[in-house]
Image (tube, grey):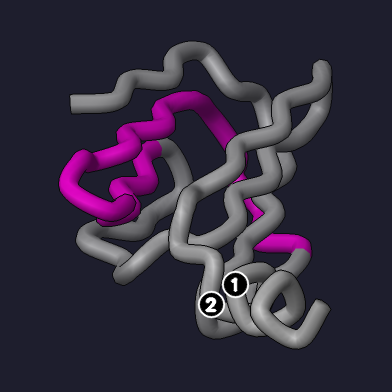
Amino acid sequence: MFNKLVKYLNNDEYLISLSDSFIHVINYKSIMSLNNNRIELMLNNKILIITGEDFIIEKMEKSEMTIKGKITNIEIK
């Protein structure tokens, strides 16, 4: 059981949740770019690019972010 707990706490896979009014990203590595209409986040070995309008960072922690606004495009490179 201890091994399962350690594996859960050290999980480095990213998770993206999307709704009509927000996007929630868990386990991003770093913020590459951040402004009102474009956000770029480094994931494990990919870049998440979110474009839209009137972005508001509702929640931001070390590896977790919730972004509200009009999301027009999401791309993973």
- For mark 1, give the secondary structure: helix
**Residue stretch rendered in magenta on the structure:** 38-58
Where residue 60 appears, x then y in whole percent? 64, 74
At 30% from the left edge and 47% from the top edge, which residue is drawn? 40
Label number found at residue 46: none
**Mark 2 = which residue?**
10
Query: Magenta segment, principal secondary structure?
Result: strand
**Mark 1 = which residue?**
7
- Mark 2 neighbour class, 10 Å CA radius: few under 14, some 14 to 19, many 20 or more: few
At 59% from the left edge and 72% from the top edge, which residue is drawn? 7
Quadrant containing the N terminus is bottom right
Quadrant containing the C terminus is top left
Vertical placement of residue 29 versus 5, above or below: above
The answer to whether residue 24 is left or right of residue 36 is right
**Distance (Cα) linking label 1 and label 2:** 5 Å
Question: Disc 1 vs disc 2: Cβ atoms closer than 8 Å?
Answer: yes
Amino acid type, label 2: Asn
- Nearer to the camera, 56 or 73: 73
Check if residue 48 falls in the magenta segment: yes
